[in-house]
Amino acid sequence: MNIGNLFLDTEPPVQGEKFETLLTHKNLVVERIVSSADTEPVEYVQAQDEWIVLVRGTAVLRRAGEVLALTAGDYLFIPAGISHRVESTSDGALWLAVHLHPAPAAA
């Protein structure tokens, strides 16, 4: 059994984001993301569904052209195939991302 603390080692990187996989189980992946205030927006269109929660800080996210201002506690579902990107974050913004990959095809 894995045990940890979401808030340990959450110093933000000087630039960009720091990703850490907390759990991988079957087609589920849970990541912790720590953002710096100096991030370059990257457009994502993923093959998997993603549910995110902003645990600490503030962020501006663009999903399918819609701009969303997020504060600590806000969560959001991003279906597979939907474009999204983080426009800006506060320094040390802390995210929890849950990725649900398509189930493997039955043999």
Image (tube, helix red, strand yellow):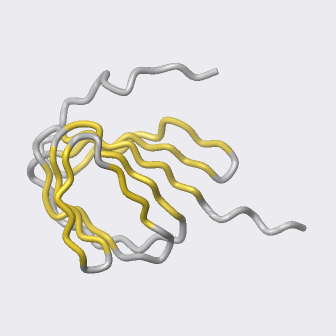
Q: Residue placed at 25% from the left, 29% from the top?
A: 10
Q: Taking 40 as reference, is 79 left or right?
A: right
In the rendered image, residue 48, in percent from the top left (x then y), is placed at: 54, 65
Q: Residue placed at 37% from the left, 27% from the top?
A: 6
Q: Taking 49 as reference, is 19 left or right?
A: left
Q: How many marks?
A: 0
Q: Looking at the image, is 44 positioned above or below residue 6?
A: below
Q: Quadrant of the C terminus?
A: bottom right
Q: Looking at the image, is 96 positioned above or below residue 42?
A: above
User: Residue 33, located in which quarter of the rendered image?
Assistant: top left
Q: Outermost residue toward the bottom? A: 65
Q: Quadrant of the N terminus?
A: top right
Q: Residue placed at 40% from the left, 21% from the top?
A: 5
Q: Tell which of 94 and 66 is nearer to you.
A: 66
Q: Outermost residue toward the front? A: 74
In the rendered image, residue 34, in percent from the top left (x then y), is placed at: 26, 41
Q: Outermost residue toward the right? A: 107
User: Residue 14, located in which quarter of the rendered image?
Assistant: top left
In the rendered image, residue 56, in percent from the top left (x then y), is placed at: 22, 37
Q: Looking at the image, is 45 positioned above or below residue 87?
A: below
User: Residue 42, located in which quarter of the rendered image?
Assistant: bottom left
Q: Residue placed at 17% from the left, 40% from the top?
A: 57
In the rendered image, residue 77, in percent from the top left (x then y), is placed at: 43, 60
Q: Taking 5 as reference, is 9 left or right?
A: left
